[in-house]
Every structure is written in structure tokens, then in C-alpha cells.
Amino acid sequence: MYPKGQSSHRALLDRRIGMSNVVHYKCPNCGADMAFDSVSGMLRCDSCGRTDNIEHMAGMKDLPRDAEVKYEMNDEDIQAANSAFVKDFADPSDTDEPGYYHTFGDNEAHEYHCKNCGAVIITEINTAATTCSFCGAGVVLADRLSGILAPSKVIPFSISKEQAQEAFKKWCRRGLLTPSDFMTADRIKNITGMYIPFWLYDLNGRGELEATCTRVRTYTRGDWIYTETKYYHVYRKVDLNYLRVPCDASRKMDDKMMDKLEPYRYENLKDFKMPYLVGFIAEKYDYTDNELLPRVKERVGSYVDSYLRSTINGYSSVHINRKNINVIKKKADYALMPVWMVCYDYRQTEHIFLMNGQTGKIIGKPPLSKAKIAMWFTAITTGSFIIMQLISRLLGGALL
């Protein structure tokens, strides 16, 4: 039973959310688009300042296409939403029929329609969340986050765009060999918040090692010098568990840079909810957990090997006769990790930097100043020459 005067708007809201593949989160106060706020960890409306917790809003979206929404508005919400949703649903071109979006081939782009302004949104096949180029509204493509494509976990952004931009500028200023004019102007071309697909593996690593080790002792008796060598047979066996070993599943991202962005703080890992993605770009995985498993096994295998070797110490020499390492996958969770991508334009060259959206760690190589390098080289060379001269004079004075 709907309140008097609200039934038509509420019914349209139910139908819209239940049928659409393009998900918007509207502010119940003013009807503007809401986005995830990394500072508060809530959905926030930039227009009126209203905030809503993720669990409250997520229930409106994480539903089957034919489900009826049971989101209950209070009287204040209904009164404020009345005028906002009337305008939103009055457009006769706004339809929720299944043919409202067009799907191209498996390896082509996909076409969606922005439910905010009606513009066409063309995305790559892996894009799961983006923004409308016309109205700037954050949209989530629900059909790319369901079934086997649904993430299990997410680490939300805890650093805002403004904080990321300021931290990046401070990081650049710390570079001793960075050109002086590198940060004198606002050269940031764009800064984009992205959720990168990861697989988090729980693995068991077992290792077994046999080695021949020696301890050598030298001593003197009378005029004779003796060397005593003792041989030992060493055996080690370990059974280790590794939890949440990350591996990025994006073809676009450089694996070495992504490895350097780690670690993430997994105590902030959340169960996935679509509202976390609003206002950011997100992509689904390019590689399955089984496709990346050999890479992860090699990584964890090196950890087991290092641990085995670290248990053998106090010997003069170690010769490994036999070693066996076996890594077994226990489970793998599909997760999304926050990354700020900074494109910086300097002297007609674009430099790409990555920032961990949770810890603030920055990866990238800023440009180097040839003048500063020459100055540092000259200073070091001159300093070394002066020190050598002083040592020479001191030694010469002592000899005299």
C-alpha cells in the first residue's frame, strides 16, 4: 500500500530498478546522483549532502531482474523524492524493455543507455562500472557483476580524489633529481579511481629438503696447522599456509607495477556491494583463477623455498641433494582493489603513476633533471677529490 499521491512514482521506481541493467543510485532528498565517499565510507549526494550507508542502498540493486523492490521510504524521503522522480520518469523515451540496450559480438563493445540523461554509453566488454560522458553520473552495469562475474570481496577507497592529488604532489616534490618546474603548475591531466580485479588465493605450501652440510674448523698444534671438516646430513620438512595471496586479473595493468602497489590491508576487506563502485571505474577479470594459478604457485613456491633455506644455518657449506615443493590451492576469492591512476603531462610527454587507493603508496618514475644529475655528479666528484687530498696530506705529514 503506497501513501496517497505516491503510488505511480513508487511503482515506476520499482519497475525501473527491477528491469534495468544500468544502475544509478539516486538521492531520496533531491533526486541527484549519489557516489561512494571514500572518507565516510557511505554513499553521498554532492548536491544536498545527504549520506546513506551501503547496506541501506545496496538492497535496492542486488536483485534479480524480475524482482520487486521493497525499499521503504520514510515520509521525508517520499515528499522529497516526489518531484525528483516525476521529472526522471516523465520522459517517454525512458523505457525498461529488454531491448533497451544492444549487445554486440563477444569481442566487441557493448552499448547501454544512461538512465539519468538518456545518452548512449559505449563500453568495452570488461567494463563493470563507469561514468556517463555527458552528465557525469556514475553508473554500474549490473549484468557484468552477477553470476560467475560477481565479485566476492572488495576493499573500498579510503583516499579521496583530492587527497590523492595532494599526496601525489608531495611525493613528486621529494624527488631530489626531479626537475624544479615539475610541480610548479597543475600538470595533472586526469586522475581516475579504478577498481582492479584481483584473485585472492588461500594456498597450502609443503616443502621437503635434504642437504649435505659441513662445518670446518682450523687449529694449530706445534708446527702443524690442522683443518677439521665434519659432514652432516640435514633434513627439513615444512607445512605452511598462505592466506589471501593477491594476483591481479587485468590484462591492461602492468603486473610488476601492481605487485609493487601491495600490500593491501585485508582487515578492511568487505563483502561486495554495488554501491562501492558508484563514481569509479571498474572492470571484470580478464583471467580466471585457474589461468593465474601457475603464476601464484611459482610465487608461493619461492616463499616456501626461502623458508626452507632459512632453517639451515650455522654451517660452513650447504649442498642440497634433494628438494621437493608442492603448492596446493585451497580456494580463490574474486575481489576488487582500489587504485588511483594519475596521468601527468610534462613537456608534451604523458607520465603514468599508480596509487594504492587504500594505503596511499605510489608507484611510478617521475622525469629526471639532467642539470640536477650533473650537479650531483659534480658535487660527489669534487667532494671525493677533496677527501682524498686531505687523506693524502694527513698520511704524508705522518710519514714526514
Image (cartoon, rainbow, N blue to C red):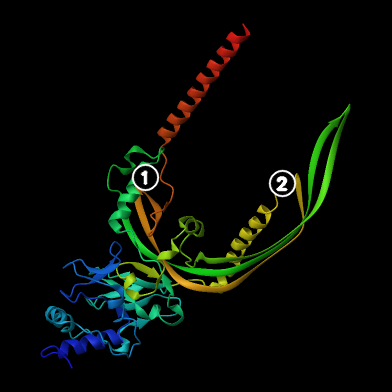
In the foreground, 37 or 242: 242
Label disc, if present, on residue 314 of the rendered structure: 2
* Structural crowding at the residue carrying mark 1, measured as other residues with C-alpha within 10 Å and reported as few (<14), some (14–19) or many (≥20): some
Residue 189 appears anywhere in the view: no
Instruction: Please state, as top left, top right, bottom left or bottom right, where the N terminus lies in the image.
Output: bottom left
Task: Please report contact status of discs 1 and 2: CB closer than 8 Å, yes or no.
Answer: no
Which residue is rendered at x = 28% and y = 42% of the image? 184
- Neighbourhood count class around disc 2 (C-alpha, 10 Å): few under 14, some 14–19, many 20 upward: few
- Picture disc at residue 172: 1
Q: Secondary structure at mark 2?
A: loop
Question: On the picture, is 143 further left or further right than 253?
Answer: left
| Residue 367 visible within the image | yes
The image position of residue 376, as x and y in percent, is 45, 31
Which mark, by number, is residue 353? none
Above-or-below relation of 163 to 120: above
Query: Separation of disc 1 and disc 2 at Cα?
Result: 45 Å
